[in-house]
Amino acid sequence: QEALDHDSEEEEDLGPEENTVGEIPLHWYDDYDHIGYNIEGEQIMRPARKDELEQFLDRSDGSQWRRVWDERNQREVVLTDAEMRLLRRVQKGRYPEAGFDPYQDLVEREHADAIHPLLNTPEPKSRFVPSKWEAKKVAYLVQAIRKGWISLDRKADAPAEPSFYMLWDDANDAEERQRKRWSMHIPAPRAPLPGHSESYRPPAEYLLGEEERRAWELLDPADRPYNFLPRSHDRFRHVPMYKPFVRERFERCLDLYLCPRSVKHRQNVDPDSLLPKLPSPAELRPFPTRQSMEYKGHEGRVRSFSLGPSGQWMASGGDDRSVRLWEVASGRCAAHWRMDGPVKHVAFSPNPDFPVILAVTGKEVHVLDPDLANGEHREQLDAVLAGALPADGAASVTWTRGEEGGPRLSVAHAAAVDRVTWHAKGDYFASVCCNTRRNAVLVHRLSDRRTQNPFRKNKELVQDVAFHPTKPFFFVATERHVRVYNLLRQQLMKKLQAGVQCVSSLAVHPGGDNLIVGSYDKRVCWFDLDYSARPYRVLRYHKRAVRAVAYHPRYPLFASCSDDCTVHVFHGMVYNDLLQNPLLVPVKILKGHSQVDDLGILHCEFHPTQPWLFT
């Protein structure tokens, strides 16, 4: 009766607009205009939510910290002072009621006829229903007795069972365990037998000279061929005690005790069947196979070069402070520019209508005009290069006009510039400063001499950048990651984990869905942007640092050059079918360069139309 009275009091406390749907999931009403039913059975319509302006006005009275959202009734409730006091007491671990006495005396009441069970759960059905599993077991035993599977009569001549037995073990079980133990025993590997060098009077060829002794002492103990120095003694009794004897015996005991031994079943597998079936390199032609031409003219180390969009001209720069323009077919030097310092990088414009060359010296990027444009394009190029310069230097750069016979334009940066790269349309180009985190990457527009800084500060040092061939994507290679940005949305699209110590170069596939990354720890990583953020393949063919990687614009070829003076040429076929993985096959190793000051091949690039490789 008390419980009924309590329920009725709760119903009286409910207002006319209170939701009375009960303990059901509230998301059942997400697709309806109402949120439940009131005590009269009428639908409670879903109230309108406050917008940001109304929420801001509610915060002006200073009561926003008292407001809570009633999910059942879809309304905002302001807590009273009494409710706030109750919540504070609960947060402090106290009783909700301030006057509650937890140590009050127990009032015993007499209930003569009442029964109070510990559990008021109903009896399970299995206690008063016969078990069908027991019936099946009894039926099986009856069938076994009838067919003679189980014999109930003991034979008179059966030997009597012994009256004694093993208290803790069974003899048969002990023998079985001993047999299994010996069958699984793996003998310890034997120590190697002593050789001639360990004799008390070894031959002369086993004794170390003075230089060999010093070289043996400089080696790490783990790299030494043996852990003692061979010595010759006249008599066996003159042999002294071996000092590390106790330590070696102790290490031997540790090896036997700590090193696990297990039985491995040898499988008869043909080793050739484990290798992937790759096509023959003769079927993957054309690709470069031998040296055809050599361009001589630089007096110092050649740092970089770049081919024009038509493949007829090539620009190169080096430590001799000069930029040279070569005719590819004949090897003739058509033009020559003298710069203020060593040329770190050159880049030929990919736009055939506006052929200009970018050259990097120190903190400046120079725009050179090789005078290859004709007719209308010549006038347009002169108009672009002769345009007005910006009034103030944006993004810490300064645009200046050069003298006659030298660079047409120059862009001065705040730090030393290491690389430049062109956009596919030939109007934008990006510069990279590898030794600074602020203003490390700047994007310049040649037509109106504007400069933009897409990143205020980089977490890592930027090593190389590249533009996507067709989409507004920008690839930024840091020391250990490659980040892909969307320039239109101005957001990070993907972060690729190269898994290398330091990235050295970056190249994007002409299709735009794949890229390769070279690193200073002798690795070349192929990334499939639709596959994963980790490398699809890691190529470890070089013996020293990889300096540059390059794709061919038309043929399925890519190459990598290294300080080991080798160029590895690969066949890299990318299929239109997304279910088929790219095919990577090494086809040729080109040699011909020599190391100078521990540096090998610094740059490589393919011809735009022919299967030729320049290094």
Image (spheres, grey):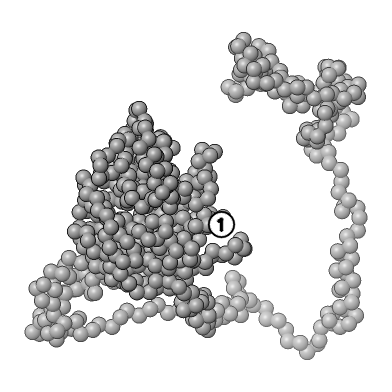
- Which amino acid is tagged 1? Tyr
For image coordinates 10% across by 85% down, the residue present is 235
303, above or below 81, in the image: below
Dividing the picture into quadrants, the one containing residue 441 is top left
Dividing the picture into quadrants, the one containing residue 446 is top left
For image coordinates 39% across by 71% down, the residue present is 288
81, above or below 273, in the image: above
For image coordinates 32% across by 72% down, the residue present is 291
Residue 249's x, y, as percent? 29, 71
Of residues 431 and 365, the one nearer the viewer is 365
Residue 505's x, y, as percent? 38, 54
Dividing the picture into quadrants, the one containing residue 72 is top right
The answer, for residue 196, to whether it is visible in the render is yes
Residue 369's x, y, as percent? 33, 47
Q: Residues within 10 Å of mark 1 (few under 14, many from 20)?
A: few
387, above or below 43, in the image: below
Quadrant where the C terminus sits is bottom left
- Tally of numbered tags: 1
Residue 518's x, y, as percent? 39, 58
Left or right: where does residue 62 sit relative to residue 590?
right
497, above or below 51, in the image: below
Left or right: where does residue 607 sit relative to residue 412?
right
